[in-house]
Amino acid sequence: MRKVCVSTLLAMLVCAPLSARADEEQSSEPVKVEQTEQGLAAISLIRKRGGHVMEIAQNDNRLEVAFHLADGPITDEDLAPLKELSGLIHLNLRGCEITDSGLASLSAIPSLKRLHLENTKITDAGLSNLEPLKDLEYLNVYGTKVTDAGLAQLAGFTNLKKVYVWQTGVTIQGVQKAKDLAPELRIIPDLVVELAKAETEVVDTKKGIEDADKAVVAAKKELEEAKKKVQLVEQKVKDAKTFAEEAKKRLADLEKIKTPETAAEAARQAAEAARKAAEAARKAAEEAKQAPTEAEKPAKKDA
């Protein structure tokens, strides 16, 4: 399966063909505009340059024009015919060789509602040419040199509802200022909101690290206590072995003694040594029950 990077996917979503949003422009009442001879000639010229000219819907013959799929480069000069069109409401110039000068041609198209300028060469200076577009509702300046100054201009567009500013010079401060000027304007991404989310994630991450550190300290303490218990059991086992050896030695001495009185004393001592060995072994067994098993030790250590 071919992998698609996140930034590419976002760009694809944001820059989707205008026709995918045509339903937002549909009206229950048919919309009909008449093209002049100059408009029809402009449509022919646009298509000749590789542009796509389409009607919005079956009952709405207003136009959308898309140059982003043209085979050759689209420059400022190619925008001149657009002003001859009647009812042009969608325009896609994504990835075209458009500059601030080219945007001057758009100032004569007040019917525009959606405008894609992503990955073009425009700057803040060119956005002033869009001021006559009073009906503009959607603007995409993704991947351009637009900055906070340009975003402040856009905040003054009364009908603008959504503007995309990915990979531009727009800052958090610029977004906040624009939101103050136009609270209803949706700026994507909203850097103010994203910063708040990031700060929350940082706090949560720090808390998680602190909790993990505490868990590590507690695990180390448990491991040390377990080691002490193991050492205690090992010492008890060692004592039991010592007493057992002593009992064996006493028993061996007993076999060598011929006098009954001496033999009886040696037997008593051997029995006492055996009792101590048994007692030491019993304590070792009790300690072993409380100490971690060999199977548990790696788990403790991993903790």
Image: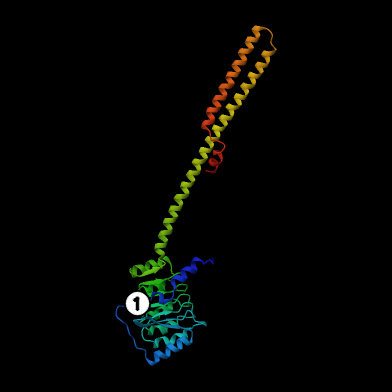
**Residue 167 drawn at (x, y percent):** 47, 69
Determine whether 286 is above or below 106 in the image: above
Q: Quadrant of the N terminus?
A: bottom right
Please tell me which residue lies in front, 29 or 212: 29
How many numbered marks have been drawn onto this rendered protein structure? 1
Q: Which residue is mark 1?
A: 25
Quarter occupied by residue 114: bottom left
Identify the coloring: rainbow
**Residue 150 drawn at (x, y percent):** 41, 74
Determine whether 198 is above or below 44 in the image: above
Dot 1 lies on which element? helix
**Residue 288 drawn at (x, y percent):** 54, 30
Q: What residue is drawn where x is 40% and y is 86%?
A: 83
Kind of residue sitting beneath label 1: Glu
Q: What residue is drawn where x is 41% and y is 80%?
A: 91
Quarter occupied by residue 229: top right
Determine whether 72 is above or below 226 in the image: below
Determine whether 261 is above or below 206 in the image: above
Q: Residue furthest left?
A: 29
Residue 65 in sight in this render:
yes
Please tell me which residue lies in front, 254 or 134: 254
Please tell me which residue lies in front, 124 or 46: 46
Q: Residue furthest bottom?
A: 37
**Residue 17 drawn at (x, y percent):** 43, 76
Residue 169 in sight in this render:
no
Mark 1 residue crowding within 10 angstroms, few (<14) / some (14–19) / many (20+): few
